[in-house]
Amino acid sequence: MKFAGKVALVTGATGGVGGATARAFAREGATVVAVGRDTGRLAELVKLIESEGGAADAVTADVTRPDEVAAMVETAAARHGRLDIAFNNAGIFGMFAGVTDYAEDVWNEVLATNLTGVFLAMKHEIAHMRRNGGGAIVNMSSNVGAHFRLPGASAYAASKAAVTALTRTAALEYIGEGVRINAVSPGPIDTPMSYRPGETREERDARYRTALPVGRVATREEIAAAVLWLCSDEASFVVGHDHVIDGGATA
């Protein structure tokens, strides 16, 4: 129960990695504040965590809306008296097209969600943590971006590379006040994003047996475990790190 007495906020909590991480925090004793846009799915996640013996509640918010992000942090702190941990996980892939064919509205949506959403979340999370003795933040980046380029995924790669740079900059700005900030950069994970259109699980798994040195996609729990470690006291000397978890793809 390494997070007993702590309050952990997870954005994008109704997604595969977000849900797995929220459940993992709860199993380790944290009170989880699950954030997402789908109120019904958030309620289902809270019930699941409670059925597993954990403590959780939900806040409906869209990370692209500044007022909702501010309210998200204020609500979490008001309900539980503190905010110790944040996993800024909400993100989208966008479309698959070359730069000349990439739709501008999709570009703007990807950057607003993946990059500006992380900025807005950190803006309010850090402000609270600075006033209340510090905390730990992990941002969801990707191996596609700063570490690896994927033709057709320009918006996603640009947004995630920027998350890495934003994470490292903020980490240096606020570590002196006890706010420790890092990122995780996964490769393919066992979520819908790892599939090509119309691809079956068997076809996907066969593709990654040769596409990745490790021969498979990551489980959601493997990414969750890395996030929990970065938020734990065991990682207290880890600052501004972008933790690549991609089965050797960028080794």
Image (cartoon, rainbow, N blue to C red):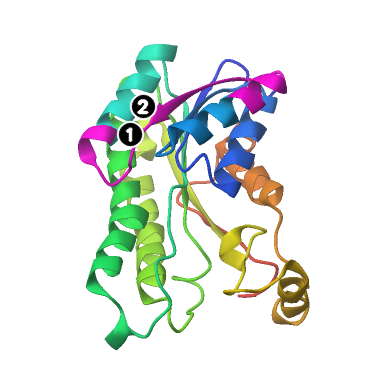
> Can you say whether 166 is above or below 30 in the image?
below
- Between marks 1 and 2, how big is the CA–CA gap? 5 Å
Q: Position of residue 96 (x, y in %)?
A: 43, 77
- Dot 2 lies on which element? helix
Give the number of the disc on residue 129. 2
Depth check: 239 or 17 in front?
17
Q: Residues within 10 Å of mark 2 (few under 14, many from 20)?
A: many
- Dot 1 lies on which element? helix
Q: Residues within 10 Å of mark 1 (few under 14, many from 20)?
A: many
Depth check: 170 or 108 in front?
108
Give the number of the disc on residue 126. 1
Q: Position of residue 244 (x, y in %)?
A: 58, 62
What residue lies at 39% left-to-right and 82% top-to-bottom? Answer: 97
What residue lies at 34% left-to-right and 35% top-to-bottom? Answer: 61
User: Hey, which quadrant is residue 236 in on the image?
Assistant: top right
- 122 displayed left or right of 245: left
Q: Position of residue 104 (x, y in %)?
A: 23, 72
The amino acid beneath tag 2 is Met
Q: Is residue 132 visible?
A: no
